[in-house]
Image (cartoon, grey):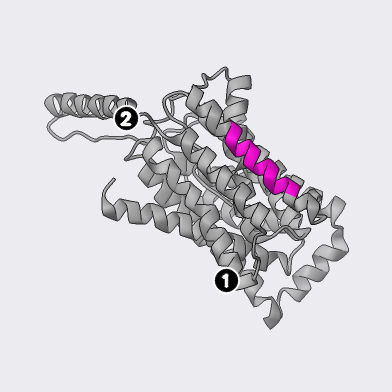
Amino acid sequence: MTRQHACLAVLVATLWGINFLAIHASLEQFPPLFLVGLRFLIIAIPTVLLVPRPQVPARWLIGYGLGFGTLQFIGLYLGMAAGFPAGLASLVLQSSAPFTVILGAVLLRERLSGRTMVGVAAAVFGLGVVGVARAGAGAWWPFALVILGGFGWALGNLASRQAKAPNPMQLTLWMSVVPPLPMFALSLLVEGPERIRDAMIGSWSIGALPAWIGLAYTIVLGTIVGSGIWVWLMARYPASVVAPFSMLVPITGIGAAWVALGQRPTPLEFVGGVIVVVGVLWAARTPRAAVDAERGERQDADGERSEGDPSPVVDRTTAEADTPVGSARFTPVGGSTC
């Protein structure tokens, strides 16, 4: 990866890490379930009007929207609204990585290498350490909710993988069409119309400006800009090269929350977090031989295109789509976060 493109990957990780502060600001004004529906409704309207529908089976589009867009954010937003720290949430949400590997093996019968199993086991152990630390602080329930969010992200990963979208960015945007209706229905049942009404009336005051800024950040920088750059990088490099940059997200998130909100992780939470990051990075690391083989295959393919077409168009958007999670490569992210 070139230095400029590596800087772009770091930029995305930074945007996604700060995104947890933006979510925290929005939750200060809006009920969590209603906020999820509002977030995706704002994205869904221009998507339906301006973006072509991705050429994928409807079941995988809906599955992606229910897993990644609905269940993930039910867990994350409810957990953060219940008091789970924004920075620590950016770490615990990485539970999607081991969940993706385990579900891929169970549901899709994908192969697990020894390296992957060791990395996943380490990540799960690290999450357990964080969970013990939160339980000791009397806050295990919000932790469990964020873990549920990671599980939803993993289900979305599997659905998006099965979709094999020719244009992943279209799939990411159209996924936003799924969550609004179920989220608004849940919000009415759980949070009630009076709480929603009071939140919307109060949102037009000056004091609610940070909530709207946070929502705008989440939509524009966290979703559209961050996901757009990420998909662009994934189309040009092996997943094993790009995906590890996602582990900068909890580092950025915890650092930003520490500075902005004074949310300092306990020593035990810090140790658990380090174990999670190391475990996921170990599982994501591609053996050198596999990288060399892939590079050779790409060069051969490009050479064949060049001989057959004087102006070849190289489309690598789905270059990683047919690689089983947990075999030669491991991708802990689904193209978007938070």
Q: Nearer the viewer, residue 237 or 220?
A: 237
If you read the primary sequence from the N terminus, does the residue marked by circle 1 or circle 2 appear first?
1
Residue 78 x %, y %: 75, 53
- For badge 2, the amino acid type reads Arg
Q: Nearer the viewer, residue 242 or 54?
A: 242
Residue named by callout 2: 288
Residue 100 x %, y %: 58, 32
**Which residue is pictured at 66% across the width and 64% down the height?**
24
Position above or below: 114 against 144: above
Position above or below: 161 against 173: above
Q: Give the image quarter of residue 4.
A: bottom left
Residue 148 x %, y %: 72, 42
Q: Nearer the viewer, residue 115 or 71?
A: 115
Circle 1: element type: helix
Q: Quadrant of the N terminus?
A: top left
Taking 176 as reference, is 134 left or right? Answer: right
Residue named by callout 1: 259
Q: Residues within 10 Å of mark 1 (few under 14, many from 20)?
A: few
Taking 199 as reference, is 160 left or right? Answer: left
Magenta part of the chain: 121-132
**Which residue is pictured at 69% across the width and 60% down the height?**
85
Residue located farthest toward the bottom when viewing the structure as drawn: 206
Dominant secondary structure (helix, strand or loop) of the stretch shown in magenta: helix
